Image (tube, rainbow, N blue to C red):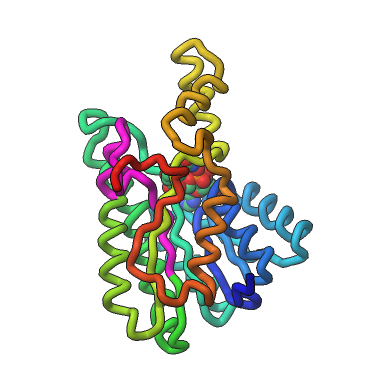
Amino acid sequence: MFLGLSRKSVLVTAASKGIGRAIAEEFASEGARVAICSRDKENLLKTSDDIKSKYGIDVLWCVCDLSKRKDVERTVSAVEKEFKSIDILINNCGGPKSGNFSDVDDSDWRDAVDQVLLSAVTATKFVLPKMIEKEWGRIINISSISVKQPIDNLILSNSVRSGLQGLTKSLSNEYGKFNITVNNVAPGYTLTNRVYEIAVNRAKELNVSHEEVLSDIAKEIPLNRLASAKEIASLVVFLASMKASYITGTTIPVDGGYIKGI
Ligand code: NAD
């Protein structure tokens, strides 16, 4: 399928690992100009080297803590300077702290808002003027199935990601007239290192193997397995493409059927 992404410039945030990295790779495979950021320089270097050796594409990388507004501003403006404009913005982030209502305090709430919501607000603010000028743009926020079906022990994700969903819909209403689409992709259980580590820790607590923990999760999913990060990336790249020109303001789960509602 011709996606028309060659030479489009894309910034994927929180992309040294996991879903963000898979998204960066998928764009690189389509010939896009790719920039990534995360907190850790070593991981960024490794990811950018890996992508270069696989796809022959130089990946621009910036060290950035998404919970710090100044870092986000510095990153987006550095990428814009290098690429002249950012055609596609993928707002991904690290997951907020887990826990129930009584486990988190005010500073956890603020951290979650900074990382999940305000990082997307700041990056979006920066990219919009050029998108408006070019009358073309794609903004895709990586969210979670928690916005459709709250997950136990994830009060921060369940709450703050819904704010991101509201932002997505509002932006799509405001900027549709400039041919800018704004969407959310909501991954279900996806086998990244983070999920693997969570499974290993839970296995230790329960005195079972991590395979058992992962298999129990899979039993809750109609497709009977966790997603690969690449399966999330496939939808993201499609939404960014010419083929998805009439899709905006929506949240699309990639969850193997996990969400129980119709
Ligand atoms: P991951 O831990 O594998 O990767 C997260 C990436 O974010 C890493 O590159 C990390 O360095 C970066 N990062 C973390 N905090 C950061 C910060 N403050 N500033 C900059 N970069 C930061 O996670 P993942 O599994 O790929 O998940 C990505 C997002 O998708 C998370 O928000 C997660 O909650 C959400 N999500 C994941 C799943 C899943 O099952 N994996 C399901 C639903 C939603």
Residue drawn where x is 43% and y is 89% of the image: 133
* Residue 201 seen in the current view: yes
Percent across and percent down for residue 185 are: 42, 56
Q: Nearer the viewer, residue 193 or 181?
A: 181
Image: 64 above or below 175: above
Residue drawn where x is 51% and y is 41% of the image: 190
* Residue 86 seen in the current view: no
Q: Nearer the viewer, residue 68 or 146?
A: 146
Q: Nearer the viewer, residue 103 or 100?
A: 100
Image: 107 above or below 55: above
Residue drawn where x is 73% and y is 53% of the image: 50
Looking at the rendered image, the quarter that the N terminus falls into is bottom right
Image: 88 above or below 113: below
Tell whether 41 sits left or right of 187.
Answer: right
Percent across and percent down for residue 110 are: 27, 47
Tell whether 167 sits left or right of 230.
Answer: left
Percent across and percent down for residue 134 are: 47, 88
For the record, the magenta segment spans: 139-160
Does the magenta-highlighted stretch encompass residue 146?
Answer: yes
| Rendered image quadrant of residue 138 | bottom left
Does the magenta-highlighted stretch encompass residue 32?
Answer: no
Residue drawn where x is 50% and y is 18% of the image: 203
Query: How many badges with numbers are in the image?
Result: 0
Tell whether 122 sits left or right of 244.
Answer: left
Percent across and percent down for residue 28 are: 66, 64
In this view, the residue farthest toward the top is 207
